[in-house]
Amino acid sequence: MGNNPNSHLTLEDRKIIEQGISNCEPKASIAETLGKDKSTIGKEIKLHRILTYKCHMPLECNKYRHCQHGRNCKSSCPDYDPFRCSRRDRSPGACNGCPNFNHCRFDKYKYLASTAQAEYEETLVDSRQGVNLTEKEAKDMASVIAPLIKKGQSPYTIINNHPELGICEKTLYNYIEGGLFEFTGSNQIIALDLRRQPSRKISKKAAAQYKKRADRKYLKGREYTDYQAYIAENPNAYVTQMDTVYNDVTNGPFIQTFKFVKAGILFAVYHEEKTSKSMCAGIDLLEKVLGQDIFRKYVEVLLTDRGSEFSAADAMETDKDGSRRTRVFYCDPMRSGQKGTLENKHIELRYILPKECDLKALGLTDQNALNLAVSHVNSKAEESLEGKSALELTRFLYKDLFKKLKAFGIELIDKDEVTLKPYLLKKRK
């Protein structure tokens, strides 16, 4: 083709890559056709391929057709035989044109030139309009800089002593003035933290160009349309909806809420911070409360919104042994109604924990206080259940789930004692 090996890939180049994959050509052959390095083609395919089908098992196992263990795969299973696909996982790296595509029941990826080009153009715009840092990278950088700023060191000294940060003094000033480190938790940095705050004022236009660039790769294969496709194929799947409730964005507390949709039960975890790490810890706690088998049964699907605290999709989906414990999907932006059954439970929870009040002063200081509030919400008689409560329904239909929640501290409250008022927690104090 005579292409410059250092030039960016064009839409036509990507169409050749897509055709090459469909023709079962290896990456080396595609690279030779385009006059590019083999590694360039490999990175392009891996970066822009789309997950079009998710394996229904926690682990991809070659023996799934004749599984004698209920397909509840664990890496410790004596019959576990990891599935490996040289075409999907090595060369060319996608499943386009695979003769077994329609019959394969393992994770399937496709590379589409038009999608890859659109993603490339979006990344190109972002790199010019925003900071080329993901949220994690910004937090890692802040973890180095914040302690030194608090010791009174200047940006010059920090950059001089930490060349691994890869930025200059002026860039660090711009990051701090632009608010890049305002949302990095305990390592927050604002302009007032500087020993000598620059006298110049940054314009709104200039500040806008230092807005953190969102890392959206975790959404691939997990958008609401993917959720709908999964449910259409698995109509009996148990779905749990997840969100956060809080009043004070700075001091918390932050409540991670879960709604077991079929059972109608609300579960909640108390947090002191609203980060992706703490939300993953909340899921870990729920799994510990229920036990691995019951967790995987009732939290087969986890539907949540696109808040940054829920961006660690892989960590939420995966157990410590590397097996998949749930499937995470995300609602469309500004469409909270897509998890409306949880939003309705939030309304009831807000009877006890009203907005615009100090929740800690109200009495919400730990998990036990939150369990009390959740117990009263779950014990409320529901018209849709003909006067029964969600806990009563769970006790009758989902006994294994009820038993685990009760052991954790979510109790069935006598109907005449159900209290959905803020003084419930004050009375506890």
Image (tube, grey):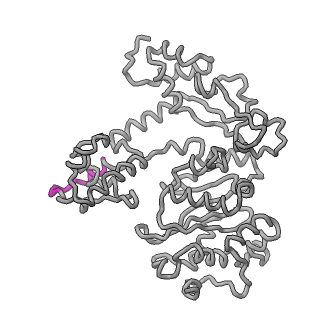
Lateral position of residue 129 relative to residue 260, left or right: left
163, above or below 280, in the image: above
Task: State the quadrant of the C terminus.
Answer: bottom right
Q: Position of residue 308 (x, y in %)?
A: 48, 54
> Residue at coordinates 46% horizontally, 70% vertically from top-left?
252
Query: What is the magenta range?
Result: 198-209
Query: Relative to residue 27, is residue 255 depicted above or below?
Result: below
Q: Position of residue 274 (x, y in %)?
A: 48, 62
Q: Is-magenta flag for residue 203?
A: yes
Image x and y of residue 9, in percent: 43, 24
- How far across and down, in percent of the image, does residue 48 sit? 52, 32
Please name the residue shown 70% across and 32% down the image.
83
Residue appearing at x 26%, y 57% in the figure:
149
Q: Is residue 172 left or right of residue 125?
A: left
Quarter-of-image position of residue 73: top right
Depicted 85 relative to depicted 182: above or below? above
Quadrant location, the N terminus: top left
9 falls in the magenta region? no
Q: Which residue is at the front of the view, 124 or 271?
A: 271
Q: Nearer the viewer, residue 167 or 132?
A: 167
Residue at x 79%, y 71% (from the top left corner) = 395
